[in-house]
Amino acid sequence: HSFFPAGQQLPLCARDTGTYLGFALAFLTLIGTGRVRASRLPRLPVAAFLLALVGLMAVDGFNSLFLDIGAPHLYQPQNVLRLMTGLGTGVAMVSFITPVTNGLLWRQEDTRPSFRSFRQLAVVLPLLLLALLAVASQSAWLLYPIAILSSLGLFLALTLVNLVFVIIATPLVGRFERWRQ
């Protein structure tokens, strides 16, 4: 279930590569658009769309599971489809995890949603398309950048989720004003 550019396996499976590449690219988009400290969830239509992307990954994942266990399945799974559904899920994860973390972290909240509209969400699409093409090309020279970016996305996702637990478990809710703190 992995990509093998130049005969070398990427460190994560196809679905996880997509998920954490999507996470990293969507987080970079929040930085680039000045919404990295946004503390509100996406508006309802955008949130519903993002949850539908997660649902597509779930359908694809169960379809793969059914094939693996010899059960009837809907279609033949492919790594490119795993990658695509992972990319969408990574964007959804950033859209929900980042505002929750920010809402707990900062004293002065940025009351904007992570992605207010489909237009704002569309800003990440060119990056996702480039990531899809880069991974699917299985070019040897892209092996390390893809592996590093997807691994950084994994590290960032785990950091944000664990930060939520640390903040909740300690008296640190709303205590920070600057990144340096």
Image (cartoon, grey):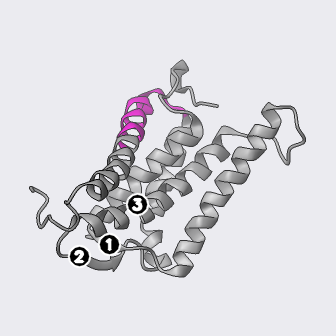
Amino acid, disc 3? Ile
Q: Secondary structure at mark 2?
A: loop
How far apart are the two marked residues, 3 and 2, measured between alpha carbons? 15 Å
Front residue of 23/172: it is 172
Image x and y of residue 79, in percent: 65, 38
Name the residue tied to disc 3. 97
Q: Tell me if I can see residue 36 in this picture.
A: no
Amino acid, disc 1? Ser
Residue at the spot 59% in from the left edge and 45% down from the top edge: 83
Front residue of 121/42: it is 42
Residues at circles 2 and 1 in contact by the CB criterion of under 8 Å: yes
Name the residue tied to disc 2. 109
The disc, 3 or 2, on the residue closer to the chain's N-terminal end is 3
Residue at the spot 35% in from the left edge and 67% down from the top edge: 99
Residues packed near mark 3 inside 10 Å, few (<14), some (14 to 19) or many (20 plus): some
Front residue of 146/142: it is 146
Name the residue tied to disc 1. 39
Q: Which residues are magenta?
A: 138-152
From the viewer's perspective, tell me whether residue 141 is left or right of residue 138: left
From the viewer's perspective, tell me whether residue 78 is left or right of residue 177: right
